[in-house]
Image: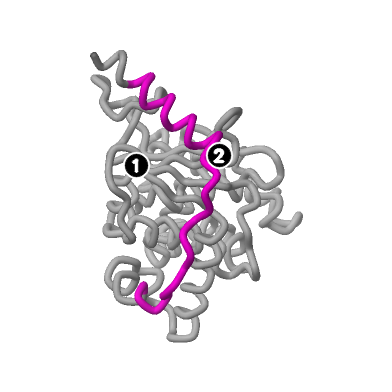
Amino acid sequence: MIYLIIPLIAACILYFLLFHNSRPHPITDQASWHEPLLKQVSFYQKLNEKEQQIFRQRMAAFLEETYVDSVGFELEELDEILVAASAVIPVFKFKEWRYNNLTGVVIYPDNFNENLGYKNKDPNRMIGGLEGTGRFEKQMILSRKALHHGIKNDTDQLNRGIHEFVHLLDKIDGAVDGLPDALLDNSCIIPWLHVMPQEMEAIRRDESDIRSYAATNQAEFFAVSSEYFFSRPQLMRRKHPEIYKMLNLCFNP
């Protein structure tokens, strides 16, 4: 039965992504987001009142341009709030930023596999998020479980929403390669190319507190270290000053 269910789910989501023409629902009350953001999002908590208002405005702009829908459960407003917050956090210091390489976000109830089924006997193949390619170009798929966990828990330096949106930033120059050419000044690229492989090797030797997935390749290193940067900035500044400096230049131009 599972072999029939997985293709069916994949077909449903493909239909939605290719043929769904309705626009995102209108944004009516940004002020109502303040309390859930204050409760859930540590980045938002650290902003002053004026910055919080700007943050909510940026969220509204994102949701007005981007589909957010669900597969396998009924979407709640908090889900949309957390997706939009995850989108805004990496680009908050960029003026009038728009994700031109994204049109929609689809949320699954739990981690899923490469066939877009969310039940798999091999837990090592389960995915918390991905950016689509080919027919799914300009689409993002997220696990609801991973999205909520990343927002609520900063102590593990894991934030899947931020991770996937950083991949989109990395993709601006056409390649997801861990070299944020569009974000870093040219004079910083060579130092970044020096620091990144050194730390990846330290991770492989189990001599770094950056989680092991960062050693997969340069693109994952950039995304995982960015999760760390936004989740535990002071800790990263103390333990990884060079990486912190590079990421600070990326995200705080």
Q: Residues within 10 Å of mark 2 (few under 14, many from 20)?
A: many
Task: Please give the residue where the numbered disc 1 appears in the rendered image.
Answer: 143
In front here: 61 or 157?
61
- Where residue 73 sits in the image (x, y, percent)? 27, 43
Residue pushed farthest front?
22
Task: Please give the residue where the numbered disc 2 appears in the rendered image.
Answer: 219
Q: Is residue 24 left or right of residue 121?
A: right
- Where residue 135 sits in the image (x, y, percent)? 58, 29
Q: Is residue 64 left or right of residue 190?
A: left
> Is label 1 in a helix, a strand or a loop?
strand
Looking at the image, which residue is at 73% across and 58% down?
185
Q: Is residue 89 magenta?
A: no
Looking at the image, which residue is at 36% across and 27% down?
9
The CA distance from mark 1 to mark 2 is 20 Å
Location of residue 77 (image quadrant): bottom left
In front here: 189 or 241?
189
Residue type of the residue flagged with mark 1: Ser
Looking at the image, which residue is at 57% across and 57% down?
65
In front here: 48 or 75?
75
- Magenta span of residues: 6-33
Residue type of the residue flagged with mark 2: Ala
